[in-house]
Image (cartoon, rainbow, N blue to C red):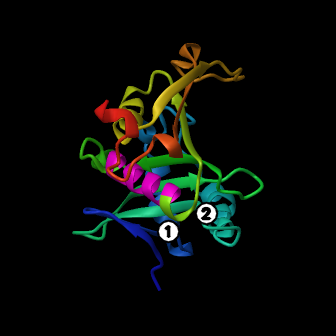
Amino acid sequence: MVRVFLATDRLVLRRFTEADVDNLVVLDGDPEVMRFLTGEPTPRAEIEDDVLPGILRAYDRGPAGRWAAVERSTGEFVGWFALQPPEDGSVAEVELGYRLKASAWGRGYATEGSRALLRKAFTDLGARRVWAQTMAVNTASRRVLAKAGLKHVRTFHLHFDDPLPGTEHGEVEYELQRTDWTDTGQPAHADR
């Protein structure tokens, strides 16, 4: 049985199932998709033993988590979206995340899914703050976060033993507070 978390005009976000192993292997196997994450494909065994079981276990801890994104028109898996809670499982502050197949890039899916998750976080889950983080050089994701209504709040530097190209420019954090959000998907102050 497919358990839908939410739907947009073009996407359905549903719970992952054990049958999604191949979808995740293809997604995380694309070096372009992984460029700003790990820089290399995720091994199948890691997806089977750690990644997917972790996603599935999280559904029992609360309403936030990670969902498979499929096109409404074709049913094709195009990636995932997430509202990740902190370790304690609370939803007062959740991290927005997404990972899409390269074939889905440039079609507005990341913005569409992100806006829908912001609405869900603020109206249904009672979140006070949604935040996201990416490499400073990941300009495509930064554009998506801005279009979705999040604002850049800081640039910071982490130490990595084996840094990815661009790491020297730092990481960026974006956020949207409930008080700055309206149901139009735009920040409350956008019309000022």
Q: Quarter of the image for the C terminus: give it.
A: top left
Q: Residues within 10 Å of mark 2 (few under 14, many from 20)?
A: some
Per the rendered image, the range of residues in magenta is 110-122
Magenta region includes residue 114: yes
Which quarter of the picture shows residue 149? top left
Q: How many marks?
A: 2
Q: Is residue 175 left or right of residue 90?
A: left
Name the residue that disc number 2 marks. Answer: 52
Q: Position of residue 63 (x, y in %)?
A: 60, 67
Q: Is residue 167 above or below residue 5?
A: above
Q: Position of residue 62 (x, y in %)?
A: 66, 67
The mark that comes first in sequence, 2 or 1, is: 1
Q: Residues within 10 Å of mark 1 (few under 14, many from 20)?
A: some
Q: Secondary structure at mark 1?
A: helix
Q: Secondary structure at mark 2?
A: helix
Residue at the (38%, 34%) spot, across then down: 189
Q: Position of residue 140 (x, y in %)?
A: 36, 31
Cα–Cα gap, marks 2 and 1:
8 Å
Name the residue that disc number 1 marks. Answer: 20
Which quarter of the picture shows residue 75? bottom left
Is mark 2 in CB contact (under 8 Å) with mark 1?
yes
